[in-house]
Image (cartoon, rainbow, N blue to C red):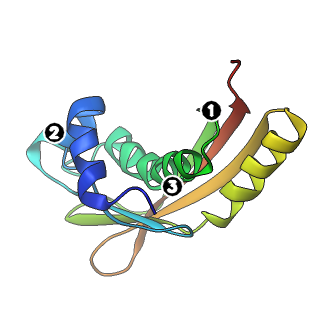
């Protein structure tokens, strides 16, 4: 595993500053799972005194994208990645500390292998579920990642 949570959080400060200032932090990453937290604060709230949906989206996307970045880096291949589509559902007001977990890391290596073998782009749908400190689901996000070999 080339990426640690602390290194990735430093990366967000420089490359994803809005996520960093809103409190989005990677807590755990491995080949199969990533966990990201964000705490409801004044800077990331909506007018209804809960977390703005876009802040939840940043945290959810990071839980999928961090694994994508790590596995592409480990592959040694020049592969580009981009979110092509996403959808979300919100089931409870997001207040307090929200933890987003994605357990779809196993799908990434398969997609990388296919794009390297065929030279064709691949799409990978990954899900991230956000829960509050009581374990209640507050939102679920799905991201369609596209990957393809970069031209040399």
Q: Earlier in the sequence, mark 3 or mark 2?
A: 2
- Residue behind mark 1: 78
- Residue behind mark 3: 67
Asked if the residues shown at circle 3 and circle 1 are in contact, with their CB atoms under 8 angstroms apart, the answer is no
Q: Is residue 45 visible from the viewing direction of this image?
A: no
Viewer-side label of 2, 1: 1
Question: Residue 111, percent across and down?
Answer: 75, 50
Q: Secondary structure at mark 3?
A: helix
Q: Secondary structure at mark 2?
A: helix
Residue 122 shown left or right of residue 14 in the figure? right
Residue 2 shown left or right of residue 94 in the figure? right
| Cα separation between marks 2 and 1 | 30 Å
| Cα separation between marks 3 and 2 | 21 Å
Q: Identify the residue at image location x=72%, y=32%.
A: 148
Q: Residues within 10 Å of mark 3 (few under 14, many from 20)?
A: many
Q: How many marks?
A: 3
Question: Residue 18, percent across and down?
Answer: 24, 32
Q: Identify the residue at image location x=47%, y=68%.
A: 30
């Amino acid at each position: 595993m080339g990426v640690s949570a602390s290194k990735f959080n430093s990366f967000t400060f420089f490359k994803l500053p809005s996520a960093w200032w809103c409190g989005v932090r990677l807590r755990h990453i491995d080949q199969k799972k990533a966990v990201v937290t964000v705490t409801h604060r004044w800077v990331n709230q909506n007018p209804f005194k809960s977390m703005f949906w876009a802040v939840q989206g940043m945290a959810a996307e990071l839980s999928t994208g961090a694994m994508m970045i790590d596995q592409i880096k480990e592959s040694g291949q020049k592969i580009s990645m981009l979110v092509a589509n996403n959808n979300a559902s919100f089931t409870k007001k997001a207040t307090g500390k929200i933890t987003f977990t994605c357990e779809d890391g196993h799908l990434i290596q398969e997609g990388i292998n296919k794009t390297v073998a065929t030279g064709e782009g691949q799409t990978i749908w990954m899900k991230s579920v956000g829960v509050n400190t009581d374990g209640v689901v507050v939102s679920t996000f799905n991201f369609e990642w596209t990957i393809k070999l970069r031209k040399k």
